[in-house]
Image (tube, rainbow, N blue to C red):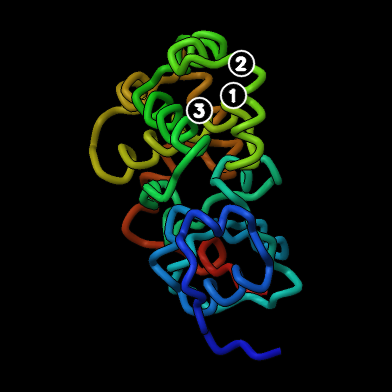
Amino acid sequence: MDHAPRIQDLPPGEAAELDPAFCERVRYARDPAYDGVIFIGVHSTGIYCRPVCPARQPLSRNVRYYRSAAAAEAAGLRPCLRCRPETAPFSAAWNGTRSTVGRALRLIESGSLDAGDVGSLAARLGIGPRHLARLFRRHLGASPTSVARTARVQRAKRLIDGTDLPMTEIAAQAGFASLRSFNAAIQETYRCAPTELRRRRGAVTAAAALPSG
């Protein structure tokens, strides 16, 4: 197989179709145009990464591609502590029904599902909850509630890394209903406690960060 990166002249939004050959070229090129558009799951290590991750490339047979961080986490993968998927940009390459998903994502990021439900979110978008769920599955490979959960965890991780706030304050600012639910979500996602993540910030261990196959 020729691994030379030859990225096609294709709008980044088209990568949502997840053509494996195309995604392979994106991965080997570490193409920043697809950062936040696709996520790379390395099933031999249980980690998922951004296309721009500087770690050594894993073997293709161990790699799967995902439309969103939430989809990768639903597959049982944890975020890479080196490329930090929670800091990936959100792609603006949405059109047609994708614009509805984009609006929904912005509302979720602002906390609309932290206290509300999918029905109220769908009503704000002028569509039904089932249609919203179908759009999320189509474009992100995950449900609105899964995406909202990932958004809360990502907010929390950014606060853990970027501030010295106590964990109770981080849990509240990130949108968790309680410290217990915050601790459980971080433990499930990162396989360690929030306090351990804070101890590690600024220094990534080889065991946790190398998504090599």
Discs 3/1, front: 1
Identified at 49% across, 10% down, the residue is: 123
Callout 2: SS:
helix
Q: Indicate which disc residue 129 carries.
A: 2
In front: 83, or 104? 104
Identified at 72% across, 65% down, the residue is: 44
Residue furthest right in the image: 61
Position in image of residue 2 (x %, y %): 65, 91
N-term mark: 2 or 3: 2
Task: Tell me which corner region of the image, top left, top right, bottom left or bottom right, holds residue 171.
Answer: top left
Distance (Cα) linking label 3 and label 1: 13 Å
Mark 2–mark 1 contact, CB under 8 Å? yes
Identified at 35% across, 19% down, the residue is: 172
Position in image of residue 141 (x %, y %): 65, 41
Q: Amino acid at mark 2?
A: Pro
Residue furthest front in the image: 96
Left or right? Give the position of 166 relative to 113.
Answer: left
N-term mark: 3 or 1: 1
Distance (Cα) linking label 2 and label 1: 5 Å
Q: Which quarter of the figure is the C terminus placed in?
A: bottom right
Q: Is residue 155 visible?
A: yes
Q: How many badges with numbers are in the image?
A: 3
Q: Indicate which disc residue 148 carries.
A: 3
Mark 3–mark 1 contact, CB under 8 Å? no
Distance (Cα) linking label 2 and label 3: 15 Å
Identified at 71% across, 89% down, the residue is: 1
Q: Pointer 1: what residue?
A: 132
* Crowd around label 1: few <14 · some 14–19 · many ≥20 (10 Å): many
* Crowd around label 2: few <14 · some 14–19 · many ≥20 (10 Å): some
Q: Amino acid at mark 3?
A: Ala
